[in-house]
Amino acid sequence: MTDAEIERLRVTSRRLGSVTLGWHDCDFCGAFAGNGEYRYYLPDGEIFAAPMMILHYVEEHGYRPPGQLRAGLRAAGRLRWDWRAERLHAVLLDQSEDPDFRCQAAVDLANWDDPRALDALRRAAHDEDLVDVAGDEIGRSLAALVDRGLAGDLLTEDLPVMVRYGVDEASDR
Ligand SMILES: [Zn+2]
């Protein structure tokens, strides 16, 4: 991979999902522990998932991701709001959906720099049942949108403790 491709991968690896309790050491050097996976929403409609270790494998061990993912990352600019975003938006706000599924939607919606993603996350931040299981993830996604200039007044908002915890965690990095 070229430096530009690696940088592109780093930039698009922005929200870690499916974080599990286990940690995984690098198979090659054992020096790094990864947890969770990145999901890449490509402009052509494809979705790739890769373990968090992908950045380490690429940077330290010369791993080359599949050609379709590399091509998609090269083409990726700002994602257009599409059916995938609509689906995540609907899942996040549907109280009859599975909580884990809604949590995943809160993570993945941060891929879209779009007021509709921000609106859904803000509403989710005040859904008490969801905040119990996914408050920190909602906060991290809100922080990602703040980083990209989409939610300037967010930090003055009255957010539940768990959501604010996620915002602070993301901002500390
Ligand atoms: Zn390694």
Image (spheres, rainbow, N blue to C red):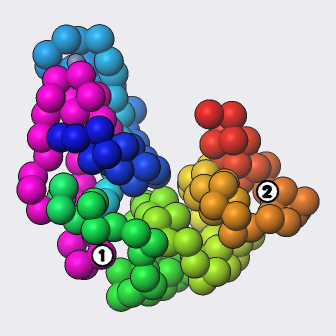
- Locate residue 103, reporting x and y percent: 49, 61
Crowding at dot 1, Cα within 10 Å, few <14 / some 14-19 / many 20+, comes out as some
Q: How many marks?
A: 2
- Asked which secondary structure carries label 2, the reply is loop
Question: Which of 105/46 is in front?
Answer: 46
Q: Which mark is residue 160?
A: 2
Asked whether residue 62 is drawn in magenta, I would say yes
Q: Earlier in the sequence, mark 2 or mark 1?
A: 1
Tell me the kind of residue under disc 2: Pro
* Quarter assignment of residue 4: top left
Asked whether residue 104 is drawn in magenta, I would say no
Whether residue 85 is visible: yes
- Locate residue 96, reporting x and y percent: 48, 80
Tell me the kind of residue under disc 1: Pro
Q: What are the residue bounds of the magenta stretch?
A: 42-68
Q: Residue at position x 66%, y 46% from top?
A: 166
Quarter of the figure with the N terminus? top left
Look at the picture and state if 2 lies above or below 77.
Answer: above
- Asked which secondary structure carries label 1, the reply is loop
Q: Residue at position x 32%, y 18% from top?
A: 32
Quadrant of the rendered image holding ligand 1:
top left
Within 8 Å: ligand 1 and the Cβ of disc 2? no
Whether residue 138 is visible: no
> Where is mark 1, residue-wise?
43
Q: Which mark is residue 82?
A: none
* Quarter assignment of residue 128: bottom right
Quarter of the figure with the C terminus? top right
